[in-house]
Amino acid sequence: MTRVTAVPQSDHVVNLNDGRSLAYAEWGDLGGRTVVLFLGTPSSRLLCPDADATEALGVRLITVDRPGYGRSDPDPNLSLLTWADDYAALHHLLGLPPCPVVGWSGGGPYALGCAVRAPALVTSVGLAASRGPLDELPDGFSEQDRSLAELLRRERAAGLEGIRNSAQWYADDPGSFFAEGWDGPDDALLAQPNVRQTMIEFELEGARQGSIGYVADQVAKFEPWGFSVADVTQDVGVWVGEADDTRVHNAAEYFVATIPRAALVTFPDTGHLLIIPHWAEMLTWLH
């Protein structure tokens, strides 16, 4: 059984050059090889998919609050590439070696942005149930998301207001994100009290500042990415759960077809929460 946890071994806040704060947490073997995990949308830094596997494999895992989540200050100009600049600044402040980055779900595009923008800092990339770009995969988004994206691009103020309204639930009741109604394997995972409680704590921290981080994530997701995934030069593991929805599988197929050094792994009897039961395999693949 995996030991998913929201309690890090160390928790920190650093200041970037523009004065914004950026929060990060560390897990596992703090003297081991570094892996950085960008978590989903919405999210916070407070999640280690399997603390026992992280430590046993000699990994120093770092998770980070994107702007507006948890203890990280908002960035009104957040994009996939500005996040890559924030990551490069954090990398420098912590004196990290070049290392792998993993993006789960909505964190996947941010991992790819770092791989393209700061290739010397990223040795390999893991995409776990990652979403793809709207411009290339419009069917990978709900009708509501496509409408909001179109409005944002046509009339930014109205689009932002629409996104804020659609994200208000996260400020009001962030723990509801992990209510029942996921796919079969995920519901089975969430039926374990420790898993559900950990995921709720993870989201409660993400909503510390309300929905501002979630709104920023949605805007970054709806806008053009600013790069092509074909420009990713690192080895990329594309990981999907067999029971995840069609949109995730279509994005995985797109990544494998477009990224020069991408390889697909499909985990049977697994859904969108695949990083929890398969974290050890993912860490073993990264280099």
Image: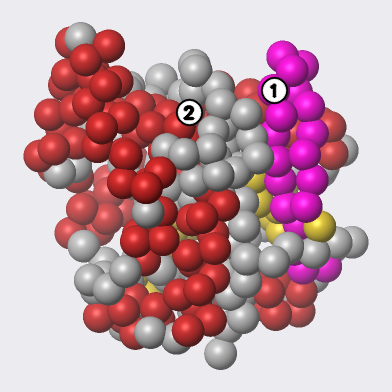
Which sits earlier in the primary sequence, circle 2 or circle 1?
Answer: 1
Give the position of the C terminus as an image quadrant: bottom right
User: Is 84 left, or right, of 161 in this rendering?
Assistant: right
User: Outermost residue toward the bottom?
Assistant: 1
Q: In the image, is residue 54 above or below residue 13? A: below
Q: Quadrant of residue 216?
A: top left
- Which residue is tagged 1? 20
Question: The residue under label 1 is which amino acid type?
Answer: Arg
Q: Residues within 10 Å of mark 2 (few under 14, many from 20)?
A: many
Tell me which residue sits at (77%, 39%) in the image. Answer: 13
Find residue 252 and report its horizontal and vertical position in percent: 31, 53
- Mark 2 or 1, closer to the camera: 1
Q: Amino acid at mark 2?
A: Leu
* Quadrant in which the N terminus appears: bottom right
Q: Residues within 10 Å of mark 1 (few under 14, many from 20)?
A: some
Residue closest to the eye, 274 or 192: 192
The question of residue 12 being in magenta is answered with: yes
Q: Which residue is mark 2?
A: 80
Left/right of residue 179 with respect to residue 116 in the rendered view: left
| Distance in Å between CA atoms under marks 2 and 1 | 17 Å
Drawn side of residue 96 relative to residue 104, left or right: right
Helix, strand or loop at label 2? It is helix
Residue 217 coordinates in the image, percent (x, y): 42, 34
**Magenta residues (range):** 11-29
Q: Residue furthest front?
A: 172
Picture residue at 40% right of the left edge, 44% below the top: 171
Q: What's the magenta bit mostly, secondary-structure-wise?
A: strand
Residue 146 point in image, percent of width and height: 15, 32
